[in-house]
Amino acid sequence: MPLKVGIPRALLYYYYYPMWRGFFLEMGGGGVLSQPSNKGLLAAGLKNAVDEVCLPVKLAYGHVLDLADKSDFVFLPRLVSVGRREYICPKFLGFPDMIRRIKGIPKLIDTNINLYKSSMEIYRAVHEVGKLFSGSSYKIWMAFLRSLKVHKQYFKLLQMGLMPNEAMAILEDRVENLPLPEPEDSFKVALIGHPYNIYDTYISMNIIKRLKEMGASIVTAEFLPDHVVQNCASRCLPKKLFWTLGQRMAGAAFSYMEGPDVAGLVHIAAFGCGPDSMTGELIERSARSNGVPFLNITLDEHTGEAGLLTRLEAFMDMLRWRKAGAAFM
């Protein structure tokens, strides 16, 4: 019977799940996902998490707990760095240790992933995980290469304008309703934030759907090729940011602001996130300099849907007034 590996539907799930799923399937393991984010998962997370962590990490606790009775292992890599001379959020680094103190949690696959000094470190990490399923280095390496191919296909779909759930459905041959063409009179709005803040419909209170219903055409950082984002970030920032996701968010925001067709920019941040507070400030200053309407939304477990909708409606009304005013100039 194949080992069941639980994968939390949280944090960097929105970046790496297709690759993780592909690797475990190639190795003969069965992937098990936690259920979509909901009130119950957040309540479980709040009960077990330390107060200092941000909302996405608190919710991630709930996702791991949801896998306790469904899997033999929970895949929770210790993400230190996924790029040369860059770091991931320190909460990610300590997350496996925070989870391990909870009773009843299955054994964790918490291999260390640290590419800060060399990308060759990925070979060690892949082999460490793969040897749980097979003693064949060749099989492990071929499984990784195939999963890496899936990862590249996934990001190509995102760059075509698909949302993660739509891209995953295509890769998994599932039937999914693809997005309808945007109305010609829609406003292009750049939605900038960590993927687990903007794509998790529970955390974001379905902000993408809300904005579309208000007449927005949504673009995100994942729609842009990595080289475009990195080039724009290196030109517009006084120095490179240490945080991989912060660097990507800033580069995408600057790229969209330089283009002529983005009517406004919405930045979503989690309360208590230090890197987000700095990155958001840099983006807001640039938006002011470029005359681009900017809305900052900070999320925590107390954020109310009514207040969010009011701010989004006011923002979209402002974009319509600007467009109407420009037509008379």
Image: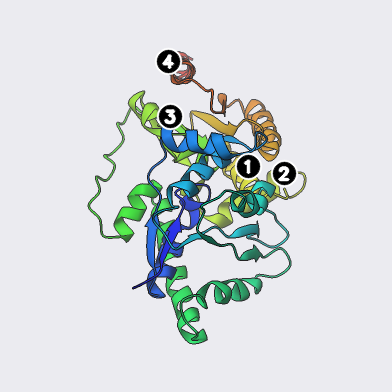
Between label 1 and label 4, give the one nearer the viewer: 1
Q: How many marks?
A: 4
- Which residue, given by chain and number where applicable, does mark 2 sit on? 237
For the residues labelled 3 and 2, the Cα–Cα distance comes to 31 Å
- Which residue, given by chain and number where applicable, does mark 3 sit on? 205
Looking at the rendered structure, the secondary structure element under dot 2 is loop
- Let me know if residue 259 appears in the view: no
Query: Which residue of the protein is positioned furthest toward the right in this rendering?
Result: 238
For the point 63% across and 57% down, which residue is it? 79
Between label 3 and label 4, give the one nearer the viewer: 3
In the image, residue 1 lies at what x, y percent?
Answer: 33, 73
Q: Earlier in the sequence, mark 3 or mark 4?
A: 3
- Which residue, given by chain and number where applicable, does mark 1 sit on? 250
Badge 1: few (under 14), some or many (20 or more) residues near its Cα, within 10 Å? many
Looking at the rendered structure, the secondary structure element under dot 1 is helix
Badge 3: few (under 14), some or many (20 or more) residues near its Cα, within 10 Å? some
For the residues labelled 2 and 4, the Cα–Cα distance comes to 33 Å
For the residues labelled 3 and 1, the Cα–Cα distance comes to 23 Å
Q: Kindly identify the amino acid type of the residue bearing the numbered disc 3.
A: Met
